[in-house]
Image (cartoon, rainbow, N blue to C red):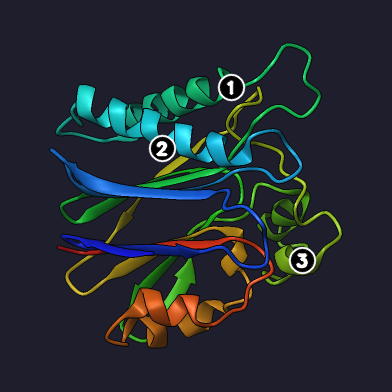
Amino acid sequence: MIIETQAVLGGQVLGRRSRQEDAWDSGMSPAGPWAAVADGLGGHADGDRASQWALVALRAFIDRHPAPPGPLDLWMRDGVKAAHEAVRTLGRRNDPRPPATTLLWAVSQRDQLWMAHVGDCRATFIRGENAKPLTLDMTPAGERVWRHEAPWDSQNTAPDAHQLVSCLGIDPVIVEVFPVSWQSGDAVVLATDGLNPIPVGDWPAILATPDPVATALAQGPFADNATLVVLQHA
């Protein structure tokens, strides 16, 4: 499924999984276009519902709490908290593996793009022929990359590459919120970990195609659910 709304393109494929546990959404806020992806945790209960409920709660928060004219950091943290609380309602008491999901949310505020990140979905910034990652996975592997103890690609191959240290639905939640300066022609790709096999350096060529979402999803077959959203500078 591929959908286009204003400055946002998005889509997903099932991959080799039997159930789609990714979700994505996009829309407009007073600050500007926004987009988000979520990846329900495999091996936990109701991963599909967890990702969907997180984004339903996030959209409801955006609709009920207009973005402030100034910095969006506190507003976005409150939005992530609302999504977290929604996912928590799905769990049962004493469930050792309750419903949980990652979340990656971007909001364009003129020439600043604000990001909120929990888990291991990835944001990639594209300007012309150059691409760079904006996020690190919230895993032990990602922490080693942050400490400059391991190369970037080790997040794909390390034994602990999928051991999340933070996700929605399970306390405590670590939320990373930060702004990125961007300009006309720039784009940011938000992707679930099913798309990790695509090298960062391939994204500029993919975005240069007439249908970048279809081009990215055609890189499979993917072992996992694969979902992406492309947010373009208006």
Task: Estimate the spatial distance between the alpha carbons at disc 3 and disc 2, rounded to whole Å.
Answer: 33 Å
Residue 98: % across, % down? 70, 27
State left or right for residue 118 relative to residue 178. Answer: right
How crowded pointer 3 is (Cα within 10 Å; few <14, some 14-19, many 20+) is rated as some
Q: Say which amino acid is labelled 3.
A: Ala
Residue 94: % across, % down? 78, 14
In primary-sequence order, the first of circles 3 and 2 is 2
Q: Can residue 71 be seen at all in this image of the molecule?
A: yes
Q: Say which amino acid is labelled 1.
A: Leu
Q: Which mark is residue 55?
A: 2
Observer-nearest of 33 and 218: 218
Q: In the image, which is nearer the foreground, mark 3 or mark 1? A: 1
* Dot 1: element: loop
State left or right for residue 83 relative to residue 225. Answer: left
Q: Which mark is residue 90?
A: 1
Q: Say which amino acid is labelled 2.
A: Leu
How crowded pointer 1 is (Cα within 10 Å; few <14, some 14-19, many 20+) is rated as some
Observer-nearest of 77 and 26: 26
* Contact, mark 3 vs mark 1 (Cβ under 8 Å): no
Task: Answer with the quarter of the image where residue 142 lies.
Answer: bottom right
Task: Estimate the spatial distance between the alpha carbons at disc 1 and disc 2, rounded to whole Å.
Answer: 14 Å
Q: Residue furthest front?
A: 18
Residue ID for mark 3 = 150
Q: In the image, which is nearer the foreground, mark 3 or mark 2? A: 2
Task: Estimate the spatial distance between the alpha carbons at disc 3 and disc 1, rounded to whole Å.
Answer: 37 Å
Q: Residue at x 41, y 29 (%)?
A: 77
Compared to residue 88, the image places residue 141 above or below, namely below
Task: Answer with the quarter of the image where residue 102 lies.
Answer: top right
Q: Residue at x 32, y 87 (%)?
A: 209
Q: Quadrant of the N terminus?
A: bottom left
* Contact, mark 3 vs mark 2 (Cβ under 8 Å): no
